[in-house]
Image (cartoon, coloured by chain):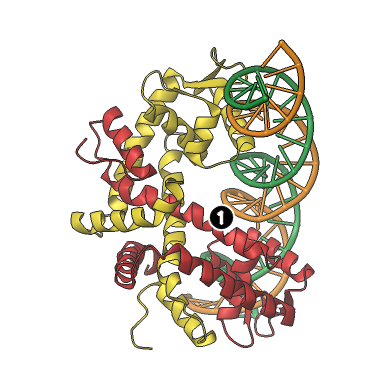
Chain colours: A red, B yellow, C orange, D green
Amino acid sequence: MTEDARDEVDRLVAAWRTERPDLDVEPLQVLSRVSRLAKHLDRARRAAFAEHDLEPWEFDVLTALRRAGKPYELSPGALLRATLVTSGTMTNRIDRLAQAGHVRRRPDPEDRRGVLVSLTETGLARVDAAFSDLLRREHDLLSGLGPTDQRALASLLRTLLAPFDSP
Amino acid sequence: MTEDARDEVDRLVAAWRTERPDLDVEPLQVLSRVSRLAKHLDRARRAAFAEHDLEPWEFDVLTALRRAGKPYELSPGALLRATLVTSGTMTNRIDRLAQAGHVRRRPDPEDRRGVLVSLTETGLARVDAAFSDLLRREHDLLSGLGPTDQRALASLLRTLLAPFDSP
DNA sequence: GAGAGATATCTCGATGTCAAGACAGTACAC
DNA sequence: GTGTACTGTCTTGACATCGAGATATCTCTC
């Protein structure tokens, strides 16, 4: 071993090199860390939203509407594309958000198959507060990296994501 | 807007800057990409494992055992720490893996509270095949970056993960 | 060696997600 | 205009996960 293990993934990669010396396990250095970091981030999000009585899935939908700008209204189809979930999941989410009073549903006047979902006043207030809180925590999570490193990291990740977004 | 949106997260950040110009949304440039990439990676994993009749959760447990080296045996506690799931989940996973014939359970001779879980021959063969396949796909997924960039990316991610692994 | 607290695993109920399919409405070619 | 393919939303059933709590065992201190 030419270098010490400095995090859990280094240990994981070292173990694989011993057990499967025939394989090139370099990709794990990047992708295992991506998975693990996403998992930790999920936990941080859950903690942040709990203070505002929101579940992560509620936040995801409400922010998509918030980001759309006035009148904070999108179709379920647009919402599921924004959140990467299936249509059945989105129906269920909208049902529960409507019941909680955070969103409203109305028929799309231009397409009788369609529906439009919009934020209520309480939904708007809730998501704005939770979002500020989330950004504060994300900022802390990134405090180990300077601005230059953060930009470099974002840029590298963008390259990896490009194939998924463009087609 | 000083720069063009080049991926979905660029668009997301641009939307936030318009809607909430009072907030510093830079952290999203990194962390939203981490989340999204993890989601895409999950899908790729699911597809890779399906060819070997394995679910992602099955793979996670089996690889932890495989990585431990002969005799491919760990306690449920060690497995849940390796996979970041709760104890209830791990009990359930081991039950189903045992039923599928991929692992075996036996009492820990040194600690009567404890149990030891080990790979069967079929479990070992299955996980080795699936792992090769996964690495091939992960390699493709990273093909947009050269070796130097990959190392840089891994290093930046390690810095972010350090606080979670050390304590 | 007795008791308090820690640890290891399992049980159980609630929940969010997905996949597949149903259904209504739209678009477009002919 | 009619038929065919497509789109948008919702329904349903199966399933993996979590969280809280139960039980058994170990460890450490006195």
Number of numbered tags placed on the structure image: 1
Decide if residue B55 is in sight here: no
Quadrant of res B133: top left
Q: Secondary structure at mark 1?
A: helix
Q: Position of residue C29 (x, y in %)?
A: 46, 76
Q: Toward the viewer: B25 or A102?
A: B25
Task: Give the image location of residue A24, x and y in percent.
Answer: 24, 40
Residue B29, given in percent of the width and then of the height, sits at 41, 71
- Mark 1 neighbour class, 10 Å CA radius: few under 14, some 14 to 19, many 20 or more: few
- Position in image of residue A146 (x %, y %): 33, 69
Disc 1 designates what residue? A43
Question: On the picture, is A121 further left or further right than A1?
Answer: right
Residue drawn at the location 50% of the way across and 22% of the way down: B103
Q: Is residue B116 positioned above or below B46 on the image?
A: above
Query: On what subunit does the disc labeled 1 rest?
Result: A
Q: B6 or A76, which is in the foreground?
A: B6
- Residue A66 visible in the picture: yes
Q: Tell me which residue sits at (42%, 65%) in the image.
A: A142
Which residue is at a point 45% across and 77% down the rendered structure image? B13
The quarter of the picture where residue A96 lies is bottom right
